[in-house]
Amino acid sequence: MKKLYSLFLFCFAASLINAQITFYDDFESYSPGNYLGDVSPDWTTWSGATGGSLDVKITDDMASSGKNSIFFSSTAPSGGPVDIVLPFGDKYESGLFTFSLKIYIPENGSAYWNFQGEEAIGQVWCHNAYFLPSGEIQFSNSDNGLALGSTYEKDSWITVDYEINLTENSWKINVNNECIGSFTNGFNAVASANIYPTTGNAFYIDDVTFSHNTNVEEKRLDGALAMSSVPAAGFTGMEQGITGTITNTGSEMVTSAEVVVKFPDGDKNFTFDNLTLAKGDAYEFEIPEMYVIAEGNADIKVELLKLNNETDEEFCNNIFSGQVLGVTPKEGKNIIVEEGTGTWCGFCPRGAVFLEALTKKYGKRFIGIAVHNGDPMVVSNYDGQHGFTGYPGATVMRRSVDTGFGIIEDLELPFLNYISENPLASFSVGASFDESTRRLDFSSEVVAKRLIDGDNRIAIVITEDGVTGTSSGYAQSNYYAGGDRGPMGGYENLPATVPASGMVYDHVARAVPLGYAGDASSFETELKKDEMRLFNYQYQIPASFNLDNMHIVMMLINSDGTINNGYSISIPDALEGGFTSGNEDLIEEVEEVNVFPNPTFDNLNVTIHSNTNLKVNIDVINVLSQKMTSMVKTLINGENTLNIMTNDYPSGQYYIVIRDNDARRVVQFIKE
């Protein structure tokens, strides 16, 4: 049943606090099968429409207390559609706010919820809670960063309690009556809870409570610990720093602080003296020893042990606990992250910030590609192929679609998972460039790590950094303006619409010479372990593109369409390596192939220069490697011409593939 109390004795973190309980719902007053929003005046949905696909039904399959609970699972590819909201009745910016729920996650499940910071939902996600399939818990703040971490057990009821001192900006979290730590929040307010099943989620919720009290008990000696930089994941042997803030939330002046850190080789204590922290003052500290990441999962804990050589009076806001994942990457393995973005998308700056941060952290092992949508940088035959239903979105090795990823770990953890897998093959690339025609010839050596004999394909993406433009389409929408959503790589200091003159775009996809799906003929003959195959390609670089800022990204595609391995090299570096002509893959008898007009509308002329009489197969394929036209032609020594009618072709990019046994030439053209 639902209960409203005027006074309730609430126990949190072994302390008793007199609190005004305003809401409690155990779902016992409803009947199984009821839509929650239809039978409760307190619950609603994201759109406000109850009783439909966004609403959740009461169930008696599982309960923590009584017989009823509510069950969530995602039935849509990108999560949802169930999307319910519990308004708190006001936007609370001071005082003590508490929130509690019980959650049951089955063996194959996971869970998610968030707090909204404004009464108008969809404005500020001030907190996110992720219960991952692995059994890991991630609590984030409004800065989209990992604030606290823990673990949980499947197939059991878990109690999660929040004690949020909004006056002091101290957000404490208790899991199964054990404090896991506290954090300060960039957006220090709460207005509602939003429970939404993301992709793969399955969980039950019961016994939901919240309260608000304007009175906050003041303590004599109390400090709040908040971490600003703490290791969460990385390659084995990486060194990362630990920084944080100690805020005096007590009445007594703080002159010294002692912090203990759990390192892989044991606990170490650090003392900070000569402080002068009055109530409300903060001290930013840096641990003078680097944390060296070890293989596997390791617990990390940072605790504010003492103030003024005394134990402080409040334990739960003194600790940070989490896990550090260490992974050793496999030799030659690189990971492709394709990020859906657009200048019209106000949340998309975080995609750019995350790609840049992970590129800086992992170097060439992390290959980020910005797949633009609905703006001047769109590549029509690349955009729309990934299955993004929201922006920003991302695929990691085309294995999963993450729409609206919130924290950088949403990209980093799959990256670390996949980079520990052995690659099927490795790449190297060299190139040559004709400045007069702006034709780039590039060669790629593929060395098999094990037998390649299935429908594996080579795919290529050409990218460019430092892209700018002058039209309004290059102006970036920016929902991080003003800082209400916390810092986001400097976008919080930029206007709500960043003018084109202030924007520079990196990792921009410019072309997919072999189409999104890749070349189906790449491995028509098997490639045995340790054997090398040389591929030759061409790309006509538009005059508006800056060669010095461009990259060639190679992909090895699995038979199921996922990516097995990737490789990226700047075009200047590829030019230093030089182009290698492959006798096996390039038809030496065919000296040159020209197409005109390109782009074409209904009629394409093809000129083939051959140095001998030669019988060849000629196919026209689209970006999905589907054949549009096939023919057999006997070339004569000299110039050969043919005409291809394209009036029935849909607009897009196509390829003419000329084959003689295992050798070939590939030329691209555009149908308008």
Image (spheres, rainbow, N blue to C red):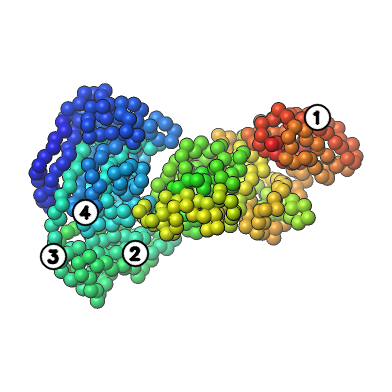
Mark 3 vs 4: CB contact within 8 A: no
- Residue extending furthest right? 637
**Disc 3 residue type?**
Arg
SS under mark 1:
strand
Q: CA distance from mark 4 to mark 2?
A: 27 Å
In the displayed image of the protein, which residue is found farthest to the bottom? Answer: 274
Q: Between disc 2 and disc 1, whose residue precedes?
A: 2
Apparent side of residue 226 relative to residue 659 in the rendered image (left or right): left
Query: Which residue type carries mark 2?
Result: Thr
Of discs 3 and 4, which sits in the foreground? 4
At label 1, the amino acid type is Val
Whole-percent x, y for residue 7 in the image: 9, 44
Residue at 55% x, 50% y is 472
| Residue 99 figure quarter | top left
Closer to viewer: mark 4 or mark 2: 4
- Dot 3 or dot 2, earlier in sequence: 3
Give the residue displayed 19% in from the left and 40% down from the top.
209
What is the residue that sits farthest to the front in this orientation? 472
Q: Is residue 242 above or below residue 188?
A: below
Residue on which the image places disc 3: 220
Question: According to the image, label 2 marks what residue?
Answer: 243
User: In the image, which is nearer the foreground, mark 1 or mark 4?
Assistant: 4
Vertical relation: 220 (above or below) 384? below
Instruction: Find residue 352 and report its horizontal and vertical position in percent.
Output: 49, 52
Q: Badge 4 local density, few (<14 within 10 Å), some, or many (20+)?
A: many
Residue 593 in view in this figure: yes
Q: Position of residue 212 (x, y in %)?
A: 17, 47
> Which residue corresponds to mark 1?
632
| Residue receiving disc 4 | 94
SS assignment at label 2: strand
In the rendered structure, are the residues bearing label 2 and label 1 in contact, judged by CB atoms less than 8 Å apart?
A: no
Q: Residue at x 59, y 54 (%)?
A: 470
